[in-house]
Image (cartoon, grey):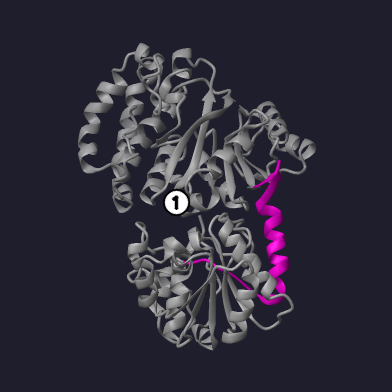
Amino acid sequence: MSEVVPPLIEPASLARGVLCVAAGGADAVLACGGALALAARQGAHPTVLVLAGPKDYSATVEAAVAAAFERLGVGDVRVDASSEPAAAVERALAERDPSWVLAPLSVAADPARRRAAHAVESALAGETERRLMLYGGRVAAGRPALLDVGSVRRAKRAALATLGGGSPTLLARSAARDRARALTRRGLARAEAFALLDAPALAQFGRELAGAAWVRHGADELPAATAVLSSFNKCAEVRENLCALFAQDLPFARVVVVDNASEDGTCEMVRAEFPEVQLIEMPHSRFGACETFNIGFAASRTPLTAILDDDILMPPDWLAKATRRLVAEPETTALLSSKVVEPGMPASHRDAPAVNEERYMSTFRGCASLAWTEALREAEFYDERLFIYGNERDLTCRLLNLGYRVLQFPGVEVFHRTPFGLKPGARSLYYHARNAWLSMLKYAPAADLLRMPYLVLSRVVLRAGRTEASGEVSDAVGTIGTAAALRETPGAWWIVCKAALSVLANVPYCLRRRRPVRADDFELPLR
């Protein structure tokens, strides 16, 4: 995937004064720490205005936050707990007269951030001179001026090389990394992302983003979602799928179909019957599902992205229930995996407690899941080296390493037309065998890697069919039927040998990306 290099600004321009408006002290440090540190080094003496009630601010007065501001070079921190936040912003503007204002985007998921954003919009009404750097968390990304966190790693490295010098540089969160690391277990290693605009454009910018980022459902405003599905020669199934997507009680803001050069009229059908769909046609059919899904993920411009197979059917309340459950979770929950029912699925598996209870997992069902778009970008989507199969567990490992979690949510389910368990055929056997090892070489702790050969043999290859049918295997559904596939696929053991040779060839690739997962949710792909 290509990286987007964000626009650069001249740090010296910060010396004319910087005001940061935030919903909390920690919010200012984590979202704008690099910008504040850089402004301080340029002699701007930045001011932070915290707009929060007494209860909201109580968590920000702890010693770590105060120490972080001191180390960032910010000595002017003001707290306003009044019922008129816009008036507080106006007073700060009049007193400091800053040329730059840092403020949250009005479509931020946090209500306190939205309150602060609206106060800034109101205070700057009629302004013409001031420049703004708008920061946000889970927002509708993709506007030309809006930088998403996951796309700026290369620019961050360039910024580190020039930070403190006279040349233009990116405002990088890494500028505060070693000054405020105690505030977050993930550290401040990601580059900051801002929408850069002037005061007259602020209100229009907020309206445009809000129109794409939030939808009304009942009495509530919920984050909007983009449905992303990858299709290949399943015209009838895609038609039924899209009908169900457009029949949702909570509408999808956008539907993106990435077609892998189908030859059965899928693209013609989508264009004729669903003109509102964003159809992306691949030039040939040799792309893997990982790559086509990544193209769809990159096209998502909403806070949420639904990861969907082309041959599912979802009930009308799927998106509403999944969205409400996900927004009720802590921010560390990146993705929600719904229950999936498939042809041939034994009732013992469908009704097993492990399938029907909410719990945090080390993988997810890629045919019907809902994720925060920002978390997908931060984890850099699927690993395209995998091509197909096993990509969900691989992505989950990266999410776990970033401090996120994946929730199994059986409160809503979809019907998946693909039969239960390991898909028969040489290609399926090859990629399942190969990719499980590639992912574990990258992410499994050393002790687990040493145990894997024995565990794979005893718990997968020699596993009895009645054990699989009983529901004991709940997470690694892609391994169900492995023993049967080895017996029934022509040349199965030669296929496994080819997979092993590919694993050996990819050892350098895996070692360069090796980041063992220490999170409690991690499990080997066996259960």
Does the image show residue 390?
yes
- The percent position of residue 210, horizontal first and vertical second, equals 68, 57
Crowd band around label 1 with a 10 angstrom C-alpha radius: few (<14), some (14–19), many (20+): some
The answer to whether residue 83 is above or below residue 376 is below
Q: Camera-side residue: 196 or 151?
A: 196
Q: Which stretch did the figure color magenta?
A: 192-221
Quarter holding the C terminus is top left
The answer to whether residue 50 is above or below residue 450 is below
Q: Tell whether 114 sits left or right of 395.
A: right
Amino acid type, callout 1? Ala
Does the image show residue 105?
no
Check the image and name the residue furthest to the top: 466
The answer to whether residue 242 is above or below residue 79 is above
Which residue is rendered at x = 53% and y = 42% of the image? 326
Which residue is rendered at x = 33% and y = 39% of the image? 522
Q: Which residue is mark 1?
A: 379
